[in-house]
Amino acid sequence: MTSAPSGENTMRAISQDALGGPDVLRMTEVPRPAPLPTEVLVRVHAAGVNPVDWKTRQGGGMAAVLGDPPFTVGWDVSGVVEEVGFGVHTLAVGDEVYGMPWFPREAAAYAEYVTAPSRHFARKPALLDHEHAAAVPLAALTAWQTLVDTAQVTAGQRVLIHAAAGGVGHFAVQFAKYLGAHVIGTASAAKHDWLRGLGADELVDYTSVRFEEVVSEADVVIDLVGDDKDDTSTRSLGTLRSGGLLIAVPSGVAPELVDTARQLGLQACGFLVEPDGAALTRIAELIDEGVVKAEVEDVLPLEHAAEAHRRGEAGHTRGKLVLRVSG
């Protein structure tokens, strides 16, 4: 059963007073925000859970941007516009919207209400409920911006996607296929059939084979694992053709890796996602057209945010975990 929203001037939110493990997350009562000009107030129905959330909670991720606790993590939201500020003409009260507001600044998505510029949101996919829509923004925008804006993938190119079954990965597989690429993914064997259904052409079980031994002549590598885990970025250079591009998402690329790539006739860069209402509008269209699906492994109530973090940090989730806030 979902708890009702708090009083008119306050709201429930998950906050933390210190950096640390999942147990630092606690339910609090905080002032309800009000929209400034060009902003909207959104009543949050669901909030997506992403790796950057628990990394920030621990002191990594965007903790340096947010500053010292207390703060509220979370950037993925789906909900309903409750109030619009002066100058807002693209959205109206009652619109169902989704978005990734303010990233990398604090959005405080683990709460009953958020405010942000109206263009940080888009109308949510009509085919999705709020729980599934909340799973989309950060992960899908990361996949879209790496493939479309950064790599500018075109039909016929070979794209290798690490952690293809994860939140970003399963969108990257679908977008790369939509763009006409030959899609190669790394994932455990148990997820291969599902990923083939999303459009993957080749799959590598990273638990039983070194991917650089079986993948070659890739035009683009979307590395969603990073060098912190088994030198994945460095090893990925061996899968690229001359002139190929490695985009390392979780921890960027060290200057030494950029130099090594250059010496090999390759390119390597880091990446950080940005709010993009226009891209979310296009992504919503692809979802409503049946081209793209959003996978949600489980939905937990807001008060179970700590448990969602524990499960997410343990890894091996298929798609996304989501918090139900109100409804």
Image (spheres, rainbow, N blue to C red):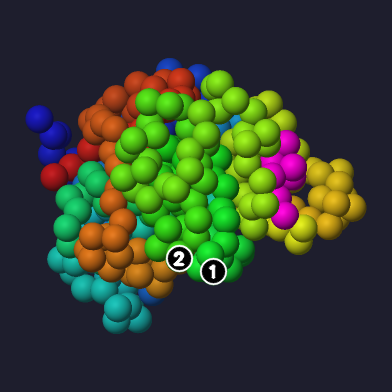
Q: Amino acid at mark 2?
A: Leu
Of 124 and 219, the residue lying toward us? 219
Tell me the SS state at disc 2: loop
Name the residue furthest left. 1
Residue position marked by numbered label 2 in the rendering? 179
Whole-percent x and y of residue 53? 48, 37
Q: Main secondary structure of the magenta part?
A: helix
Query: For residue 232, which quarter of the picture?
Result: top right
Tell me the SS state at disc 1: loop
Name above or below for residue 172 compared with residue 56: below
Magenta region, residue range = 235-241
Whole-percent x and y of residue 151? 61, 63
Q: Residues within 10 Å of mark 1 (few under 14, many from 20)?
A: some
The answer to whether residue 320 is left or right of residue 290 is right
Is 237 contained in the magenta span? Answer: yes
Name which residue lies at 26% across and 74% down. 91
Q: Amino acid at mark 1?
A: Thr
Give me the C-alpha separation between circle 1 and circle 2. Answer: 6 Å
**Residue 154, numbered label:** 1
Whole-percent x and y of residue 314? 46, 20
Of 77 and 204, the residue lying toward us? 204
Q: Is residue 272 visible?
A: no
Disc on the earlier residue, 1 or 2 = 1
Name which residue lies at 26% across and 31% down. 298
Name which residue lies at 17% across and 62% down. 126
Of 76 and 325, the residue lying toward us? 76
Q: Is residue 166 visible?
A: yes
The answer to whether residue 51 is left or right of residue 304 is right
Name which residue lies at 23% across and 65% down. 289
Quadrant position of the N terminus in the picture: top left
Is 246 contained in the magenta span? Answer: no
